[in-house]
Image (cartoon, rainbow, N blue to C red):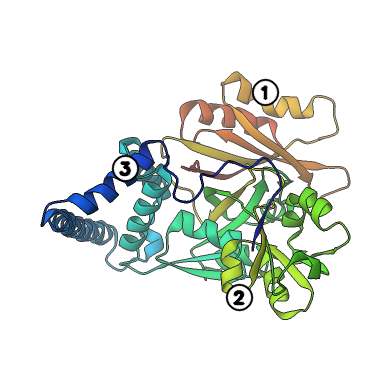
Amino acid sequence: MAKRKTGPRKRVPAKGLARKGPAAGAAAVGVAADRVAPAGGLGNIRNRIDAVDARIHALLNERARFAQLVGISKSASGKAVDFYRPEREAEVLRLALKRNQGPLRDEEIARLFREIMSACLAQQEPLKVAFLGPEGTFTQAAVLKHFGSSVRALPLPAIDEVFHEVEGGVADFGVVPIENSSEGTVNHTLDMFLSSALKICGEVELRIHHCLMGKMSGTEAVQRVCAHPQALAQCRGWLDEQLPDVERVAVSSNAEGARRARDERGTAAIASRAASEIYGLKLLAIEIEDRSDNTTRFLVVGRKLFSASGADRTTLLVSGADTDDAGALFRLLEPLAQHRVNMTRIESRPSRKRKWDYVFFIDIEGHVSDPPVAKALAALEQRASLFKVLGSYPRAVL
């Protein structure tokens, strides 16, 4: 039986006891209706549900026909990537959430509309999306959250291969991890932008729940734990407490760890619940991440910039002539403050030109076409020895 991480537990009413609250009331009404509804009462409700389903189906087909017309109006011989507009999809999702008054949760509404847009776009042909694989990784989950299920997902063994497949046109877009709320930046992704011409087209925020899994029946049989270095770091406290003497082995991905757990005696893995199903492993413990808000941010990379969506983020790559001079970074960033552009993140990385020379990756609020941002960036570019807009893209909706 899967173990939960230690901590305060919520009291759960014993089976059969009455529950309080709106949900319980609705459930009770449903049960009561099932028992006392007059003849034909439930049948009538089901008939009305069938009628609603028919209307939904008709509207879905109508939407799909409009999507076809949009494609035809742009290019009769174009590909799906030619019709994909992340700024428009973000706008549709924000409007759907603004309209939502329940009972469906915002997350469910966003997922349903994402799948509708994904299916409509795939009428032309499925988008090809490369991701850090193999199957069962959190990056694959980020692909599905952002693009929906009607895409052709291409698992690749390394981040640089994701970039190369998109650069070469084999994939339309790529999805790669960029930072975790607990463990910080994925430097390999940042460094790829030093030489790549790809642009950032979107971002995905994914809540990360880690599970311990293996072929064994309990944790006492675990001799080693395999996982991506980020996953090992995000579960360090739990491992120190629960499996202090077990060897920790860093591998290329959590899914690779799950594969080893399937094939090797004594090996367990840290991965997603989906990976346990794909690789036929038992869940030994669930939600073992050290922080309850553990979230990873992913970037969508493509070959061009897109228009503003109304709630955007811009990522820059900049450097000064002498980054070791006093005030060098202040002079670069001053135009942002002067034009009241909010900087949300900054990271430094070696420039690879000479020792102790650095470049800066900067996230700011707004789109390059927004007047304050455009003015600030024009001034910043005048002061920089290196200036590159890596992307201007919709902020993650959920």
Task: Nearest to the eye among marks 3 and 2: give it.
Answer: 3
Q: Amino acid at mark 3?
A: Ala
Q: Within 10 angstroms of label 3, few (less than 14), some, or many (20 or more) residues?
A: few
Image spot of residue 229 (x, y percent): 77, 58
Quarter-of-image position of residue 26? top left
Q: Say left or right for 384 vs 340.
A: right
Q: Which residue is mark 1?
A: 334
Q: Earlier in the sequence, mark 1 or mark 2?
A: 2
Front-most of 246 and 107?
A: 246
Task: Nearest to the eye among marks 3 and 1: give it.
Answer: 3
Q: Residue at x 47, y 27 (%)?
A: 371
Q: Say left or right for 123 vs 12.
A: left
Task: Determine the CA span between mark 1 and mark 2.
Answer: 55 Å
Front-most of 100 and 187?
A: 100
Image spot of residue 1 (x, y percent): 64, 63
Q: Which residue is mark 3?
A: 26
Q: Within 10 angstroms of label 2, few (less than 14), some, or many (20 or more) residues?
A: some
Task: Determine the CA span between mark 3 and mark 1.
Answer: 57 Å
Front-most of 38 and 220?
A: 38
Quarter-of-image position of residue 262? bottom right
Q: Amino acid at mark 2?
A: Gly
Label at residue 280: 2
Task: Determine the CA span between mark 3 and mark 2.
Answer: 37 Å
Q: Amino acid at mark 1?
A: Glu
Give the secondary structure at mark 2: loop
Q: Earlier in the sequence, mark 3 or mark 1?
A: 3
Q: Residue furthest top?
A: 338
Give the secondary structure at mark 1: helix
Q: Say left or right for 162 vs 64.
A: right
